[in-house]
């Protein structure tokens, strides 16, 4: 019986009439979804399945849930005069980091459904100054001939051990999560030491599986309707940086995106985006850089309660949900 009830509930949530029901009551509510990489057979890269994304977008259209630009949602939500113009229920899509598969695989699917999408890019990586530190860890652990590594992190031993691709993936992700909570300089030093112990030199340029879009590719995508914003210069956890470095990461990335693109979004996207990854210091720097808002990864629906008159800084902590593939899950977000 439990299985039948779950099936019936899912059928209700994904039925077009449910979307119409959601649109009837309350003020405007927008679910902002965050994506990263798209599955690529050519590079053997895991990520979001384009077929499932296509299915979700079709379901949102059938359910009369609007697909809107994230900047439109944030701007209108904070302005009583234009809030009424927002659809009652809407979804906005954002894609972080600017990997090449965004345009190669993701963009055509969004274009099929005339769905606005905003990507957040990292100018230092685009310019070839560095490549993402978590990709360096992935590369090291893929290339080493070892199946276990012993290192030290802040005076504590770190043992990495794996026997197959799956356990290696688990160890890698566990390590990456641990490194997010340490000083950024110490993080970079650890990655360098990991490469030494694993006997895997870190290439200056990222291997093809980790390639990000270049400025020409971003401008071409922009001409087709995509929008882009800044995501820091090198993607450190900003709260783990010095005040000067944090301000530079924000301000310079905004400047570079504005310089390179014709229609940059006035939205900043905090790297990682947990409540511990940014603070008043970062919010002030984002505002000083001329941005009107900033996105976090705090999982809430964007609605009027996020725009109280007493909190003028709400725009610099706008919520997002991690991407989900099922229409029923997206529909449930609106009920929270």
Image (cartoon, rainbow, N blue to C red):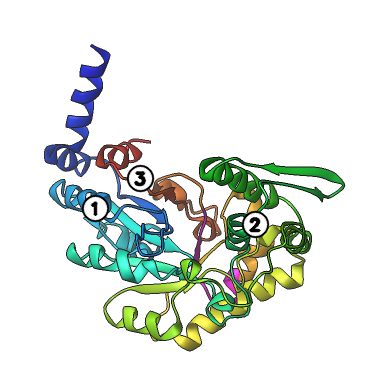
The label nearer to you, 2 versus 3, is: 2
Observer-nearest of 224 and 267? 224
Pointer 3 or 1: first along the chain: 1
Which residue matches tag 2?
A: 144
* Residue 222 counted in the magenta span: no
Which residue occupies 36% across, 57% down?
39
Q: Nearer the viewer, mark 2 or mark 1?
A: 2
The residue segment tinted magenta is 286-296
Mark 1: secondary structure: helix
Quick one: SS at disc 3? loop
Dot 2 or dot 1, earlier in sequence: 1
Coordinates of residue 122 in the picture (x, y in percent): 54, 72
Crowding at dot 2, Cα within 10 Å, few <14 / some 14-19 / many 20+, comes out as: some
Number of marks: 3
The residue sitting at 26% across, 37% down in the picture is: 328
For residue 51, which numbered disc appears in the image? 1
Image point 33% across, 79% down: which residue?
Answer: 222
How far across and how far down the image is residue 104, in percent? 32, 70
């Amino acid at each position: 019986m439990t299985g039948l009830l779950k099936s019936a509930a899912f059928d209700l949530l994904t039925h077009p009439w449910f979307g119409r029901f959601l649109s009837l009551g309350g003020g405007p509510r927008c679910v902002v979804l965050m994506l990263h990489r798209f599955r690529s057979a050519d590079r053997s890269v895991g990520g979001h399945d384009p077929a499932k994304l296509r299915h979700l977008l079709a379901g949102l259209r059938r359910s009369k849930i609007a697909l809107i630009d994230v900047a439109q949602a944030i701007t209108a939500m904070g302005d009583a005069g234009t809030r009424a113009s927002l659809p009652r229920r809407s979804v906005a899509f954002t894609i972080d980091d600017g990997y090449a598969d965004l345009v190669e695989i993701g963009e055509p699917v969004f274009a099929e459904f005339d769905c606005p999408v905003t990507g957040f890019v990292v100018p230092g990586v685009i310019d070839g100054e560095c490549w993402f530190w978590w990709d360096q860890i992935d590369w090291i652990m893929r290339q080493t001939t070892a199946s276990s590594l012993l290192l030290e992190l802040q005076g504590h031993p770190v043992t990495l051990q794996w026997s197959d691709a799956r356990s290696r993936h688990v160890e890698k992700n566990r390590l990456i999560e641990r490194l997010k909570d340490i000083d950024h300089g110490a993080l970079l030093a650890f990655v360098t030491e990991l490469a030494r112990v694993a006997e895997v030199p870190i290439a200056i340029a990222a291997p093809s599986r980790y390639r990000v879009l270049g400025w020409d590719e971003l401008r071409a995508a922009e001409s087709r309707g995509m929008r882009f914003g800044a995501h820091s210069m090198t993607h450190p956890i900003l709260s783990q940086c010095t005040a000067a470095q944090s301000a530079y990461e924000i301000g310079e990335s905004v400047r570079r995106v504005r310089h390179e693109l014709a229609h940059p979004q006035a939205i900043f996207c905090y790297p990682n985006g947990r409540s511990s990854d940014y603070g008043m210091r970062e919010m002030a720097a984002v505002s000083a850089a001329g941005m009107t808002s900033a996105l976090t990864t705090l999982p809430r629906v964007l609605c009027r309660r996020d725009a109280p008159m007493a909190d003028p800084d709400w725009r610099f902590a706008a919520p997002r949900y991690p991407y989900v593939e099922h229409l029923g899950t997206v529909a449930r977000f609106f009920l929270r």
